[in-house]
Image (cartoon, rainbow, N blue to C red):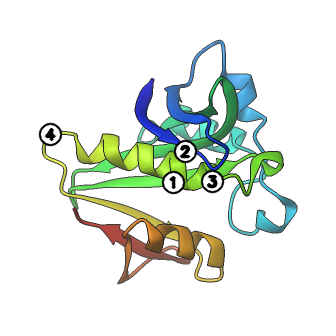
Amino acid sequence: MIDSGVRDGRGRLVTLTAITDDNWRAVADVVPRDDQRDFVAPSAARYLLLSLREGEWHSLGIRADEDVVGHVMWAYDPEDGAHWIGGLVVDAARQGEGLGRAAMTVLLRWLTAKPGFVRARLSYQSENVAARKLYAGLGFVELDLVEGDEVVAELVP
């Protein structure tokens, strides 16, 4: 479990946890709001499979106190020396509670403490105003770089 003492807008402790036999179903069942489906997978199950099948990404469950409320994943790219973040999904029923920001804060604290950490990168579609606002608020700066059809943003501590 990754715990940085971060709490969401309701005061719940937000932690990140490995995917296990005990929680994988709850994480797989996480779904975004309908209006977000142009930007993220229809459920976190897709990201779990991506992690399992391709081996580059590492999935983590997001918990608020004891409840599974989301999914996020990370990867390390030795070519650019960046830790990449992707697959952030907070369950539709839990949005608006500060969980996305809290989970990202926990993940960034953990990643930046890794030996040899240089930068974190992520990407999102330019039309995804909520993602752009969230990531800019966490210190990410958009680069003049596109990954697929998404804008790449970077955080250098």
Is the residue under label 2 in contact with that under label 4 (CB below 8 Å)? no
Q: Closer to the N terminus: mark 4 or mark 1?
A: 1
- In this orientation, does residue 25 appear? yes
Q: Which residue is mark 3?
A: 98
What amino acid is found at the position of numbered circle 3 in the picture?
Answer: Gly
Q: Which residue is mark 4?
A: 115
Q: Closer to the N terminus: mark 3 or mark 4?
A: 3
The front one of 95 and 125 is: 95
Residue 154 relative to residue 19: left or right: left
**For the view shown, which residue lies furthest in the right direction?**
34
* Residue 154 horizontal/vertical position (percent): 34, 69
C-alpha distance separating marks 3 and 4? 29 Å
Between circles 4 and 1, the one closer to the viewer is: 4
Q: Closer to the N terminus: mark 4 or mark 2?
A: 2
Q: Give the residue displayed 74% in from the left and 27% down from the top.
A: 26
Is the residue under label 2 in contact with that under label 3 (CB below 8 Å)? no
Q: In which quadrant will I find the N terminus?
A: top left
Mark 4 surroundings: few (<14), some (14-19) or many (≥20) residues within 10 A: few
Q: Give the residue displayed 66% in from the left and 41% down from the top.
A: 70
C-alpha distance separating marks 3 and 1? 18 Å
Which type of secondary structure does the marked residue at label 1 adopt? strand
Which type of secondary structure does the marked residue at label 4 adopt? loop
C-alpha distance separating marks 2 and 1? 6 Å
